[in-house]
Image (cartoon, rainbow, N blue to C red):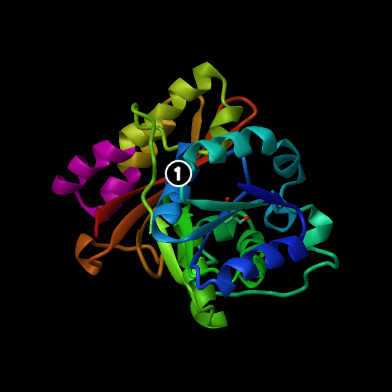
Amino acid sequence: MKVVHTVNDLKQTLQAYRNEGKTIGLVPTMGALHRGHASLVSRSLRENDVTTVSIFVNPTQFNDKNDLAKYPRTLDQDCQLLQSLLTDDSQLVVFAPSVDEVYPEPDTRTFSYPPTDEVMEGGFRPGHFNGVCQVVSKLFMFVEPDRAYFGEKDFQQIAVIRRMVEDQKFPLQLCPCPIVREDDGLALSSRNTLLSDAERKIALNISKNLFASLDYAKQHTLAETRQWVIDQINAVEGLEVQYYEIVDGNSLLSLNDWNDSNYIVGCITVFCGAIPVRLIDNIKYKE
Ligand code: PAF
């Protein structure tokens, strides 16, 4: 495993592999790696000759300075976890750049992919997806991967990046990977480390109610199901739903009826705890 901190070192390292005809997978991350990331990395290691994992807390996608400041940064632990995933013949390059390395000048590019980047997170975190597209497009240009892996916990992020890949004609395959959950159902997230034990227990009600809504939905309308999930979760002390939308899985537009699409996903964001931690999750009703 090789750790590089500059774009030049990264490009040189990857060019040598490319010259040998090797395929390259990219797993973009902001670090604080957990089993969810590990599943993306393991899949990339299986499907490509070389895997690049980027570890970079991207400032341009945070519209809340506090959120950026308290985002966990654990490079040494992250490298240990990555090392443990290696098999004899796998090649892993970790790209852990500084902010100045990625943004030697402010990035003034704008990306706009309505409605995917306007609804839900797009409404509550203005500029967030623009920042995501800025950094992910740079990573695609630095790494030039054959395949790029993203977790479906950030379901909306994948829909926006899919549009960007089409728009910018990046010659790569986008590989969405299923949410990884704890045994008790909690979706794995770097932000879970910010929860106290008590808050973590409370947070379990998010996935519990999303799963329960799959049954509820069989006997109820889409609007009733949406409202039921919101009410169930808001009834738990310490949880507050910011939004719950049941949307078409491609356009991300809210639906009115279960018959309006063959691909239906419920996307939720919930504030958990006293200094609230913002948790997101989603569930597929139809695929
Ligand atoms: O999903 C994330 O961790 C980030 O949004 C990403 C894709 C690494 C871009 O900073």
Q: Give the number of marks.
A: 1
Residue 154, horizontal then vertical, whole percent: 48, 52
Residue 284 placement, left or right of 36 = left
| Residue nearer the viewer, 206 or 238 | 206
| Whether residue 244 is visible | no
Residue 200 placement, left or right of 96 = left
Q: Is 106 one of the magenta-colored residues?
A: no
Q: Residue furthest top?
A: 198
Residue 106, horizontal then vertical, whole percent: 83, 67
Residue 116 placement, left or right of 30 = left
Would you place residue 158 above or below residue 97 in this image? Answer: below
Q: Residues within 10 Å of mark 1 (few under 14, many from 20)?
A: few
Dot 1: element: loop
Q: Quadrant of residue 99?
A: bottom right
Circle 1: residue type:
Thr
User: What residue is at 59 percent from the left and 34 percent from the top?
Assistant: 80
| Residue nearer the viewer, 273 or 222 | 273
- The residue that label 1 is drawn on is 87
For the C terminus, the quadrant is bottom left
Q: Quadrant of residue 104?
A: bottom right
Residue 191, horizontal then vertical, whole percent: 57, 36
Q: Residue furthest left?
A: 219
User: What residue is at 40 percent from the left and 28 percent from the top?
Assistant: 204
| Residue nearer the viewer, 173 or 90 | 90
- Magenta segment: 210-227
Q: Quadrant of ligand 1?
A: bottom right
Residue 272, horizontal then vertical, whole percent: 53, 31
| Whether residue 216 is visible | yes
Q: What kind of secondary structure does the magenta stretch mostly adopt?
A: helix
Q: Quadrant of residue 46?
A: bottom left
Whether the residue under disc 1 has CB within 8 Å of ligand 1? no
